[in-house]
Amino acid sequence: MPALSVHSGTNKPMMPAMKCLMTMDCPCPDCVASMAAFSTLAVEPSADAAAPDVPPADASQFTIAAHPLDGSDGGENILGGIYTALAAYLLQSPDWRRLDRQNELDIEGREAPDLILGGNKAKRVNWERLGWSGVRPLVNFYCGTELLERKAELAESLRLYCAKAGLDAEAVAPATFVFAPGSRKVPAQRAALLAAVASAEADGQRLWIAKGSESNCAKHIEVLGGAAGVEVFVDGLAAADGVWVVQRYVENPLLVVGGRKFDIRVWVLLTAEYKVKLYREGVIRTASTKYDPADIGNRESHLTNHCVAVQSANYGKYEPTNEMWFDEFEAWVASQHPGKSFMADCLPQIKQLTMHTLLSVKERLANSESAGFTSFCIFGFDYMIDDNLRVQLLEVNQSPACADELREAFVEDLAEEVIQPRFAYEMPAEGRRGSGKFRRGFEELSLE
């Protein structure tokens, strides 16, 4: 399937032809070879092939092409819920149309795209070929976002940034150690980790959590008990297991009704100008089972991922879909912890930690003026709060999920924030359709 792209209409200068947009769409030998594994690869017709029976394009529209489904992923939606909904939202406007794939096989005659929505982890975005037409398309990823999503690279970025800024790294995220089995660094990494574990155990800190550096959706996560448990785990890893991080476990989490853990998901927009904007609504994702630090094998007790909660017999017992929104959580904190406020005591910490995290990678992530594209990106930042209302960063996700109940409102606000200022288009007369239940819009955070 093609990736999402947008072309100029008559209200913008016509763009010169672009040789390649996406690796999967291009029939040139290099691209065909690189995408041979994909059975749905587009092939350019021969010179004497009949023209496809499709209506002529409306030159007054911006155009969109997307690959919402990839058969090689077993039907998994690799565009992601937010960007799929964004495409559907834009297509409600008469100023946008979706590119017909067959109509776009004439690569030499294709206009350069204004907007590209690539799949999860920027799949199929052929960075090197973007901008060949002289037009810099807007892409829904930054080149290099693995600096944030890969847990090992995020830990190293934060370590270097905090050291340079004179900050305590554990004020941003729990102590994190990278372990790369099979590398020359293993002896030093192992020694540093076990020394930290022994020191923490002497202070009463027993639990640690191991995560695959590139894992998500609660895959490759192990809660480890004590120095012996950590040592057995890391010594059992092989090079084929990839890079892992071992992180200090927050043993004293703030607990909601039923004595359950939770984490906080906030959505962060990084604009083409490297402005950081926090969505005003966020979600508290709750575990299904009472927190029990003694039962380290009970994933329902320790993990707050929605994909884990939904498998529990207790799913929905305390909150619909095991979720609370900011106003609901604020009311709960006030009722259970008089004098305390999530909005006043915790949200400012979330804003500050988000700012530090994106500053830690800015020099390597920001768009270059010479690049053939500009970027925006939505990240999902996950935070944990302890029983002292101290906030710490757990991880960062690109192409994050968004709750069904919020998605429509979120996408409307995202389009108004990022797409509308760049492309002059009109939406249907009925206007905004998202729920008024939520806090709406983005708040810009200061990077000073």
Image: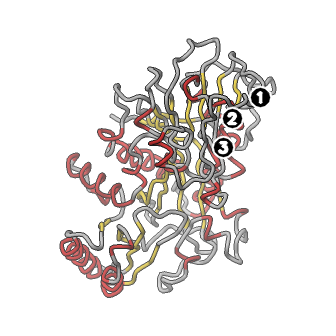
State which tag comes first along the sequence, 1 or 3.
Answer: 1
Identify the residue under disc 1.
54
The reply, left or right, for residue 356 in relation to residue 41 is left
- Where is 188 relative to 146, above or below? below
* SS label for mark 3: helix
In the image, what residue type sits under mark 2? Gln
Q: Which mark is residue 102?
A: 2
Q: Is residue 371 above or below residue 202?
A: above
Residue 328 occupies which quadrant of the picture?
Answer: bottom right
Location of residue 327 in the rendering, given as x and y in whole percent from the top left corner: 64, 50
Q: Amino acid at mark 3?
A: Thr
Q: How far across and how far down the image is residue 267, in percent?
A: 54, 46
Q: Which residue is mark 3?
A: 84
Alpha-carbon distance for marks 3 and 2? 21 Å
* Quadrant of residue 436 within the rendered picture: top right
Q: Residues within 10 Å of mark 1 (few under 14, many from 20)?
A: few
**From where the camera sits, is residue 17 visible?**
yes
Q: CA distance from mark 1 to mark 3?
A: 24 Å
C-alpha gap between disc 1 and disc 2: 8 Å
Q: Taking 64 as reference, is 345 left or right?
A: left
